[in-house]
Image (cartoon, rainbow, N blue to C red):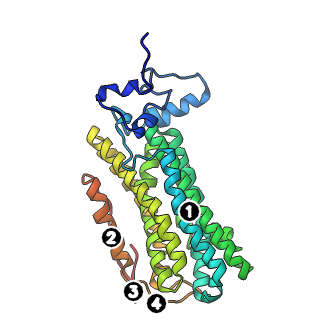
């Protein structure tokens, strides 16, 4: 037999394949799109799990190999990108320690950090586990790669928040020592905890992808990485705002690859629109409830930390959905985050 090139399975392109194409093509040996073109399976109990929650998922595609990450992320490229981001964040955290920065944090803002930021480590772990599960169950190698790297990004967020908590504890020993209890019992966090726990038992890989990356996570990221950063800057905590802005770069890539995958499956099979729409409508109430709980934070009415409201958050979230989602999936309908009138303010949702 004639000697084959490493990328012989890409020769039909009639061009030199890119590094991304070579290292991400046909990675899953057990699917019908493997290098052999045959499904390789062992008769073990786990086989039934993959059959039910991967192969028989309502979301279908003629070839999952058609998916391309817009960033064309390989492991090498990922480590290079994250190295530069981590150097930037390390510099910020070192400046905090060297300058006595934490001695100037106001009591009100310290309460906000303790109640509304420090417990974010716990849902962050939940997001990481769901992303890792999507990576485990996805039917295409490139989807496996992006979801797995997204799980790594979620751990980066958890670690950076944990580091910042420990920095503050050096000066304020009792700071955020009740984070786990707040995550488990504080009314502020319970709707989000409910959403995360339901996601952790959503076993269909595609429904988990839609619920996480198209519904809950984009809104959660926008609230915590963008609007909370704006609030921090207004309260004089400009360095934590910069850390969150850096973490938000990861979140933007998560949306980009999710948009690309959604667009691909819709173009491949228009019936996927109804499937995705049904999952959006199923999961949106949970996401909306989770966001509604944090309205007092941005309205200046968080218990123990009164401060002026951050104007326009609800309108910005409306605009975020209106400008982001239909731009890449105009066939789908994402419920708007409308206003609820109260006696003295307008609340999120």
Quadrant where the C terminus lies? Answer: bottom left
Q: Residue at x 52, y 46 (%)?
A: 148
Q: Earlier in the sequence, mark 2 or mark 1?
A: 1
Q: Secondary structure at mark 1?
A: helix
Point out residue 58 in the picture as x, y percentages from the top left corner: 38, 38
Q: Which residue is mark 4?
A: 308
Q: Nearer the viewer, residue 50 or 222?
A: 222
Quadrant where the N terminus lies? Answer: top left
Q: Which residue is mark 3?
A: 345
Query: Are circles 4 and 1 on residues that touch, CB within 8 Å?
Result: no
Q: Secondary structure at mark 3?
A: loop
Q: Residue at x 54, y 45 (%)?
A: 133
Point out residue 273 in the picture as x, y percentages from the top left corner: 29, 46
Q: Which residue is mark 1?
A: 86
Residue depth check, mark 4 versus mark 1: number of the one nearer the observer: 1
Tag of residue 318: 2
Query: Are circles 2 and 1 on residues that touch, CB within 8 Å?
Result: no
User: Image height check: is 94 above or below 275?
Assistant: below
Quadrant hosting residue 183: bottom right
Q: Alpha carbon of mark 3 to alpha carbon of mark 4: how far? A: 12 Å
Q: Alpha carbon of mark 2 to alpha carbon of mark 1: how far? A: 32 Å
Q: Earlier in the sequence, mark 4 or mark 1?
A: 1
- Circle 1: is it few (<14), some (14-19), or many (20+) Cα within 10 Å? some
* Residue most extreme to the top: 1
Q: Earlier in the sequence, mark 3 or mark 4?
A: 4
Q: Earlier in the sequence, mark 1 or mark 3?
A: 1
Q: Nearer the viewer, residue 114 or 67?
A: 67
User: Image height check: is 281 above or below 226?
Assistant: above
Point out residue 7 in the picture as x, y percentages from the top left corner: 41, 27
């Amino acid at each position: 037999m004639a000697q084959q090139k490493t990328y012989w399975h890409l020769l039909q392109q009639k061009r030199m394949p890119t590094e991304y194409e070579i290292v991400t093509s046909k990675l899953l040996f057990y699917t019908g799109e493997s290098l052999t073109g045959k499904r390789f399976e062992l008769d073990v109990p786990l086989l039934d799990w993959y059959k039910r929650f991967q192969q028989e998922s309502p979301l279908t595609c003629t070839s999952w190999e058609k998916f391309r990450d817009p960033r064309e992320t390989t492991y090498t490229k990922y480590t290079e990108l994250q190295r530069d981001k981590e150097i930037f964040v390390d510099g910020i955290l070192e400046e905090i320690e060297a300058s006595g920065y934490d001695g100037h944090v106001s009591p009100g803002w310290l309460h906000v950090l303790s109640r509304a930021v420090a417990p974010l480590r716990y849902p962050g772990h939940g997001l990481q586990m769901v992303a890792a599960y999507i990576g485990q169950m996805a039917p295409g190698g490139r989807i496996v790669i992006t979801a797995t790297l997204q799980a790594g990004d979620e751990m980066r967020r958890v670690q950076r928040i944990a580091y910042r908590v420990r920095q503050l504890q050096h000066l304020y020993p009792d700071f955020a020592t009740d984070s786990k209890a707040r995550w488990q019992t504080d009314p502020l966090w319970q709707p989000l905890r409910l959403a995360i726990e339901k996601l952790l038992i959503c076993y269909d890989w595609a429904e988990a992808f839609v619920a996480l990356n198209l519904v809950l996570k984009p809104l959660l990221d926008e609230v915590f990485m963008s609007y909370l950063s704006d609030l921090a800057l207004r309260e004089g905590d400009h360095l934590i705002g910069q850390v969150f802005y850096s973490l938000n770069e990861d979140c933007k890539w998560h949306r980009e690859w999710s948009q690309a995958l959604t667009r691909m499956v819709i173009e491949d099979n228009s019936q996927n629109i109804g499937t995705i729409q049904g999952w959006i409508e199923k999961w949106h109430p949970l996401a909306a409830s989770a966001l509604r709980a944090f309205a007092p934070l941005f309205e200046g009415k968080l218990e123990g930390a009164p401060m002026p409201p951050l104007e326009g958050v609800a309108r910005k979230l409306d605009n975020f959905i209106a400008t982001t989602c239909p731009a890449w999936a105009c066939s789908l309908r994402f419920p708007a985050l409308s206003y609820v009138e109260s006696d003295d303010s307008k609340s999120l949702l």
